[in-house]
Image (cartoon, rainbow, N blue to C red):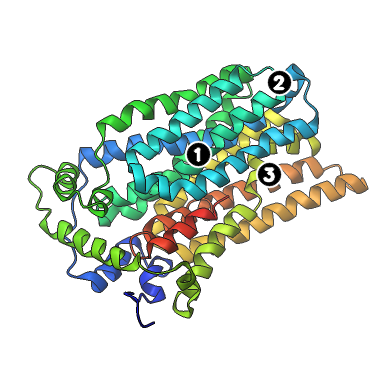
Amino acid sequence: MEGRNTVDFDEEAIFPLLKRGSCDTENAETEKIGSPAPAHNLTPAVIFSTSVSVLGSFSFGTGVGFSSPAQSAIMHDLGLSIAEYSMFSSILTLGALFGGILSGKIADIIGRRYAMWFSQVLCAAGYLVISFSKSALWLDIGRISTGFGIGILSYVVPVYIAEITPKNVRGAFTAINQVLVCTGHSTMFVIGNFIHWRILALIATIPCLLQLLGVFFIPESPRWLAKINRWKECESSLQRLRGANADISGEVAEIRDHTETLKQLSNSNLTDLFDRKYAHALIVGLGVMGLQQAGGINTIAYYASETFESAGCSAAAGSIAVVVVQLPMTILGSLLLDKSGRVPLIMASAAGSCLGWFLLGSSFLLKDLRLSKSSPFLAFIGALVFEGSYSLGMGAIPWVIMAEASHSASVEFDSQITCRRF
């Protein structure tokens, strides 16, 4: 288009990771912008920084997993109706929607570290409000604050990890985000069956407080520092991440070239997203994330206890069984991420998820028609098949795609992919 400064990307430059591993993604990118930066070994700084950042992922999981084990106790203690508790459970999504929409701007204005810090202030405040709530109104206020915080964390954590890790481990490290989400979710499911819901809310503040402290001991993202022209700090941060004796000149040059490309792309309009050359990448990005959220995971996450009770199963046993399946399958998916490829893993995960919902739906149908006494067992198996299959691929891969795509796509494209999450 004449009269504007634009840079063309083909769709494989934006989403090559759907066809290849994360290392190949970086190779495809550097073919576009210059000679590749050398691969670096992992350093304690990268491991520690990732560990601090994924405390946000853990908080994400605790936020999603809190409502299911706490349901019966909260309804009893505060005298809530089913409608009032449903509002409490689902309003987290509303907060996360607004947090997700604003996450890109917040992370760009105050940086990745302080975006995580700000998010955890909201999460911690939300849990404290929930813990001391005496009415449905205060429960909802605390829940929406927590939702806003995890909405920001859902973007900034995987992006920060992708921006600080060496290219040869970027895919695996970004997938750790989903592992910690599942760990936080599983923790709530397990301990929530044995402790009071007010104590459970206080326990959920622990990762928030740890990250609030930890962000002051990790370096800022070199790519964000480069984006705002703080080059000396960018090089200092990168040197700290790669090691005192590491040669970072090649990576600095790659970051410089990439930053200049993004500055040119920032002159593009939002309507450019709908250009034909972006169509495939846009459909893939929005489609995969949309299917992740539409796959029904929130039904299990928010209402697992009620689902198992309705099917005639033990709520506590069912919740713990979900944890036993969920976490190992998430770890397995992370290990297979770069070995088997994104597409086969997503296809297998989606097929298994469909089977799980079919079994679960069939169990309720048989129960309503009183055709089988084995419907509770069928519901139990269906829930486990769904949770295991979803955790294998659909849970983690879309987040990896979003984080890795942020290195190649335009700022506008990245922001729009971010906004769709919830």
Task: Give the residue drawn at x 10%, y 57%.
Answer: 249
Image quarter in which the N terminus is found: bottom left
Q: Residue at x 45, y 29 (%)?
A: 121
Mark number displayed over residue 299:
3
Of circles 3 and 2, the one toward us is 2
- Secondary element under disc 1, as helix, strand or loop, is helix
Q: In the picture, residue 144 is in which quadrant?
A: top right
Mark earlier in primary sequence (1, 2): 2
Q: Earlier in the sequence, mark 3 or mark 2?
A: 2
Q: Are marks 1 and 2 in contact (CB under 8 Å)?
A: no
Please indicate, yes or no, whether residue 14 appears anywhere in the rendered image.
Answer: yes
Q: Is the residue marked by circle 1 packed among few (<14), some (14-19), or many (20+) residues within 10 Å? A: many
User: SS class of the residue under badge 2?
Assistant: loop
Q: Nearer the viewer, mark 1 or mark 3?
A: 1
- Nearer to me, 262 or 288: 262
Image coords of residue 81 (percent x, y): 80, 28
Report the amino acid beneath label 1: Ile
Q: In the drawing, what numbered circle is on residue 150?
A: 1
Q: Which residue is mark 2?
A: 135
Q: CA distance from mark 1 to mark 3?
A: 18 Å
Q: In this orientation, which residue lies closer to the viewer: 228 or 44?
A: 228
Would you say residue 204 is visible in this rendering? no
Lower position in the chain sequence, tag 1 or tag 3: 1
